[in-house]
Image: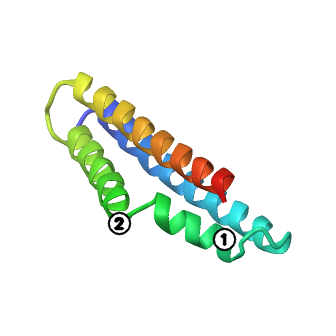
């Protein structure tokens, strides 16, 4: 495995770790300010279905596989763009649902 592949895999794992820490800290701060109530939970469940979670996990696995396998680097860029688009749509759906209620 080349140095670029190791760097890409390290970047993917670092991004997932830092994103998880940020999510955890954000939820903890929201809980302190009583921001996680029944309305938030209901909107979150309606906006983020299980299929969104499976798709997100599938994209992460595909990106890790693409970094380890000898495939064109363009595929990694396309998968990264799909990953960002996926969570941008999920976040937008959550915000829209929160504003409607």
Task: Looking at this view, name the residue that lies furthest to the right.
Answer: 33
Task: Name which of mark 1 and mark 2 comes first in the sequence.
Answer: 1
Say which element carries label 2. helix
Judged by depth in the image, the label closer to the viewer, 1 or 2, is 1
Instruction: Name the image quarter holding the C terminus.
Output: bottom right
Q: Which residue is mark 2?
A: 50
Horizontal side, residue 32 vs residue 18: left or right: right
Rendered image coloring scheme: rainbow
Task: Looking at this view, name the residue that lies furthest to the front.
Answer: 100
Distance of label 1 from label 2 (alpha carbons): 19 Å
Which x, y percent locates residue 25? Answer: 71, 63
Task: Looking at this view, name the residue that lies furthest to the bottom.
Answer: 38
User: 63 or 59: nearer the eye?
Assistant: 59
Residue located at (50% from left, 40% from top): 88
Local crowd at mark 1 within 10 Å, few (<14), some, or many (≥20)? Answer: few
Instruction: State the mark number for residue 99.
Output: none
Which quadrant of the view contains residue 41?
bottom right
Horizontal side, residue 28 vs residue 41: left or right: right
Instruction: State the mark number for residue 39.
Output: 1
Which x, y percent locates residue 66? Answer: 22, 39
Q: Are marks 1 and 2 in contact (CB under 8 Å)?
A: no
Residue located at (79% from left, 66% from top): 29
User: 74 or 37: nearer the eye?
Assistant: 37
């Amino acid at each position: 495995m080349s140095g670029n592949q190791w760097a890409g895999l390290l970047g993917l794992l670092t991004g997932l770790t830092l994103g998880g820490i940020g999510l955890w800290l954000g939820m903890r701060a929201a809980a302190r300010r009583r921001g996680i109530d029944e309305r938030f939970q209901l909107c979150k469940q309606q906006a983020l279905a299980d299929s969104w979670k499976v798709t997100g996990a599938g994209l992460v696995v595909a990106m890790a596989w693409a970094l380890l396998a000898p495939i064109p680097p363009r595929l990694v860029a396309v998968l990264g763009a799909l990953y960002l688009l996926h969570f941008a749509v999920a976040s937008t759906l959550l915000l829209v649902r929160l504003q409607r209620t």
